[in-house]
Amino acid sequence: MTEPLVIDAGELSVEEIMTTLEEGQRVVVRTEFLGSEHEVTLRYNGGIYYCDTPARLHKHESPDEMQACLRNQGYGTTEQ
């Protein structure tokens, strides 16, 4: 298995994260929540997108849902 790409939240655009996931690579996003650092693992299995947070596993069935999650959580930036 390929090593995951490890990034800080906001380091890549939503589009760059989506491309990386759709190429089969996992992305680990380091983010801060309530004063402590957490890691969120993002992955795609060809049908479902997953956001594995310290609290729960989120599933998204479409690229639009995943992109909204990445924007809303601040994991990726929006290219302008």
Image: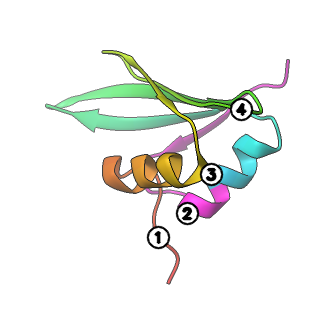
Which secondary structure, mark 3? Answer: helix
Which secondary structure, mark 1? Answer: loop
The disc placed on residue 47 is 4
- Please tell me which residue is depicted at 77% across the width and 25% down the height of the picture: 3
Residue 49 percent across, percent down from the top left: 60, 34
**Colour scheme of this structure image?**
rainbow
**How far apart, in angstroms, are the residues tagged by discs 4 and 1?**
23 Å
First along the sequence among labels 4 and 1: 4
**How far apart, in angstroms, are the residues tagged by discs 3 and 4?**
16 Å
CB atoms of marks 2 and 3 within 8 Å: yes
Residue underneath mark 3: 17
Residue 18 percent across, percent down from the top left: 65, 51
CB atoms of marks 1 and 2 within 8 Å: yes
Q: Residue 65, relative to residue 11: is it above or below?
A: above
First along the sequence among labels 1 and 2: 2
**What amino acid is at disc 3?**
Ile
Which secondary structure, mark 2? Answer: loop
- How crowded is the residue under tag 2: few (<14 C-alpha within 10 Å), some, or many (20+)? some
CB atoms of marks 3 and 4 within 8 Å: no
**What amino acid is at disc 2?**
Ser
**What amino acid is at disc 1?**
Thr
Residue 24 percent across, percent down from the top left: 81, 35
Residue 71 percent across, percent down from the top left: 40, 57
Q: Residue 6, relative to residue 58: is it above or below?
A: below
Residue underneath mark 1: 78
Residue underneath mark 2: 13
- Please tell me which residue is depicted at 62% across the width and 62% down the height of the picture: 15
Which secondary structure, mark 4? Answer: loop
Residue segment shown in magenta: 1-16
First along the sequence among labels 3 and 1: 3
**What amino acid is at disc 4?**
Gly
**How far apart, in angstroms, are the residues tagged by discs 2 and 3?**
6 Å
